Image (cartoon, rainbow, N blue to C red):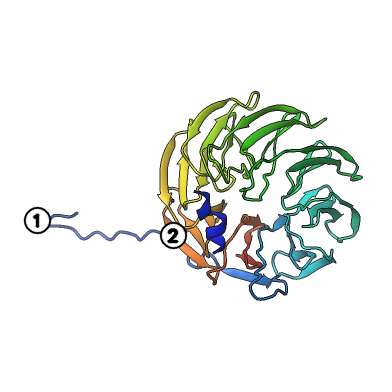
Amino acid sequence: MIKLTLWLSLITLFSCAQVKTTSLQLDKPFIEKDFFKVAWVKNLDPIYNTGNLPIGTSSPYAFEDILYMGNLKGYMQAYSVETGEVLWSANEKLPIQSQVNKLGDYVFYGTKTGRLITRHYLTGKLNYSIDLGSPIETQPSFLQGRVVLHLRNHTVITLDAKTGKIFWRYKRSIPYVTTLQRVSQLLPYKNSMIIGFADGYLVSLSLEEGVINWEQKLSVGIKFVDVDVQPVMFNGMIVAGSASGPLRFLSPESGAIEKTIDFHQSHTPLIVDGEMIVGSVFGLIYHIDKFGKVIRKLKVSDDGISSISQWKGHFVVTTMGKFVYQIDMKTLNTVSSFDLGSDQSAVFGTSVKADSFLALYSSRNRLYIFK
């Protein structure tokens, strides 16, 4: 039901011969057994009433051998990647839905009530916290000593990373009542930031003052037009799109659209060897070359794809359904899968590499670590 609400509403040799032969033994292709071998799992589900299912949409964050994960119970916790031991725990008493990010000796994250919190990455000692007035559900970004946040109320805010002093706010007016209620992270470009909004526009804002450099309409639909996926730089062009399509290639200087692909983007693209791997809301994976041409596409799932990452020489594909897939990097064929165990399970965030491990967080608030 979760998958339907968030995604499905957005739019849907041989011939015989008598010959003398020599026996030839062909080697079977090598497939690693137990690709998704579970190292440890944490159940971080909060207490809830029947019929009010709490949905986890965040992602873990890894630095060296430490894994950081906030949860809807209100705790931010740092774990040993190898053992799952809790290294430190902070009770913020407020649900945490944003992914952690790190700058210097401090980790930054936000709560669903709009409080930005920063703590020492090793000890968990509080540095400072500040109330910003609207839910923080995206990972904080850092630009030239500033922390930048895109809030749930379509406001972009920049603060001094050391002190929390606010420099400026930019508030976007959103005329649509039918939005995905998600917000994108920014793409840094020179002294500006490129960021998508729920009105279907991609906007370039100056870092110093938050003034609009340019804006470009991307989505062609009439509802659920949100540009809620982080744009990326790809061979000198900005690549950005939305779940309502299409995928656009734009000039970073002017925002002019240079190329369009009929594609309904569902996550931040993965750039591999100068080419792009990206999934759609319809469960398709596209392989796009440096010229923006689709080389191949393959159906992986009936559910939307939420992230693609590289691990153990394969792609790991998470979806809006209960399966996580091991995908061959050359053919895009499915090699194996991992069942998250419930029809209500999905991954709305991203999988994260942590040393030699892989971490992901399911919508049922389970933190999985694979080795």
Amino acid found under the numbered disc labelled 2: Val
Mark 1 element type: loop
Q: CA distance from mark 2 to mark 1?
A: 34 Å
Name the residue nearer the viewer: 225 or 208. 225
190 over 362 or under it: above or below = above
Name the residue nearer the viewer: 273 or 342. 342
The residue at 59%/45% (across/down) is: 268
On the picture, is 45 further left or further right than 17? right
For disc 1, the marked residue is 17
Q: Residues within 10 Å of mark 2 (few under 14, many from 20)?
A: some
Name the residue nearer the viewer: 65 or 156. 156
Q: Residues within 10 Å of mark 1 (few under 14, many from 20)?
A: few
330 over 122 or under it: above or below = above
The residue at 59%/25% (across/down) is: 256
Name the residue nearer the viewer: 205 or 66. 205
Question: Mark 2 or mark 1: which comes first in sequence?
Answer: 1
Q: Position of residue 184 (x, y in %)?
A: 67, 44
Point out the residue furthest to the left here: 18
331 over 188 or under it: above or below = below
Amino acid found under the numbered disc labelled 1: Ala
For disc 2, the marked residue is 335
Q: Position of residue 291 (x, y in %)?
A: 48, 30
Residues at discs 2 and 1 in contact (Cβ within 8 Å): no
Q: Which mark is residue 278?
A: none
